Amino acid sequence: MRIVLICFLFLACGKFGSAQSESSFQAGEWLKFKLSYSGWVKAGNATLHIKNATYNGLPVYHVVGKGETTGALKWFFKVKDRYESYFDKSTGVPYKFVRDIYEGGHVKNRIVEFDYNKKVANVNDLKRGTKKSVPIQDNIQDMISAYYYLRNHYDTNTIKKGDIVKLNMFFDDEIFGFKLKFLGRQTIKTNFGKVKCLKFRPYVMAGRVFQEEESVTLWVSADKNKIPLKIQADLRVGSIRSDLIAFKGLKFPFELQL
């Protein structure tokens, strides 16, 4: 499930510009994805849910991302992941990030709080019982907040084929630089009908998980919602696919092609 949740940060990327006048999402939005391994074996489910909340007295969005294996696969490799992000409603700046995962016996439970006055991220590793502070820059995002930030900070009308977007993301206790290429526009078949999409390819690290740098392809709805519809990733062994199968609370009508 971690592969799919990490990919969410790419899903709404495009050409950066100033923030759009109207947000593409609202509290109450909920998305559910079906995960399949090698095209036919059901691997699990993943969800994203956004709520209203407060953090240190500030109005924020609180997003919870979950992923878990289902069916027979969970008896061979059990996965139960939970990611949370608290970010500013106006600027999209993240204040707090939670990663609580169990992946085949691999366990991590970390809370990251961003202090922009001191320019550090305070990392509390609950499993190991350790704490550390990591220097950060102003334009940082966590894995979940990045998805929502980018939905409101790119222009779908002017993006051109071949455009590349770069983003700095804080994950675990490090800052990673990612880049993403826009491949063009495409209409695809979904569980809901035909939908116009924006197609992207992130550059990932080839090695233990991905077969090569260009192993992942993403499709995002080309309407005002800019929600992820499909992910296809070629792994070192087999492939994984994620498809949107349910949603509610979208801010704008979901546009289908006749």
Image (cartoon, helix red, strand yellow):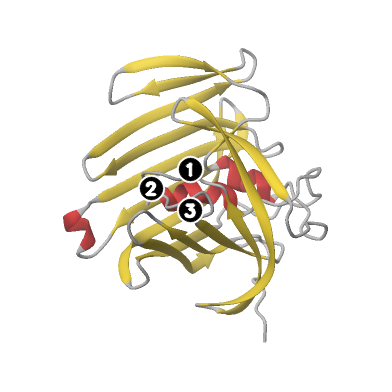
State the image coordinates of residue 183 (x, y, percent, origin top left): 67, 61
Camera-side mark, 3 or 2: 2
Q: Foreground: 145 or 23?
A: 145
Answer yes or no: is residue 189 visible.
yes
Element assignment for label 1: loop
Of pointers 3 and 2, the one earlier in the residue sequence = 3
Question: On the rendered structure, is 177 left or right of 78?
Answer: right
- Quadrant where the C terminus lies? bottom right
State the image coordinates of residue 111 (x, y, percent, origin top left): 42, 28
Residue at the bottom extreme of this rendering: 258
Mark 1–mark 2 Cα distance, whole angstroms, equals 8 Å
**Counting other residues with Cα less than 10 Å from the Cα at mark 2, is it few (<14), some (14-19), or many (20 or more)?**
some
Mark 3–mark 1 Cα distance, whole angstroms, equals 25 Å
Residue 20's place in the image compared with 192, above or below, is above
Residue at the top extreme of this rendering: 118
Which kind of residue does numbered mark 1 sit on?
Answer: Met
Residue 196, quarter of the rendered image: bottom right
Camera-side mark, 3 or 1: 1
- Mark 1 in CB contact with mark 2 (< 8 angstroms): yes
Residue at image position (33%, 32%) is 109
Q: Which residue is mark 1?
A: 205
What is the total number of numbered labels drawn onto the structure image?
A: 3
Question: On the rendered structure, is 232 left or right of 14?
Answer: left
Tell me, for residue 209, which label it has, or none.
2
Question: On the rendered structure, is 127 left or right of 210?
Answer: left
Element assignment for label 2: loop
Residue 169, quarter of the rendered image: top right
Q: Which residue is mark 3?
A: 48
- Mark 3 in CB contact with mark 1 (< 8 angstroms): no
State the image coordinates of residue 7 (x, y, percent, origin top left): 51, 50
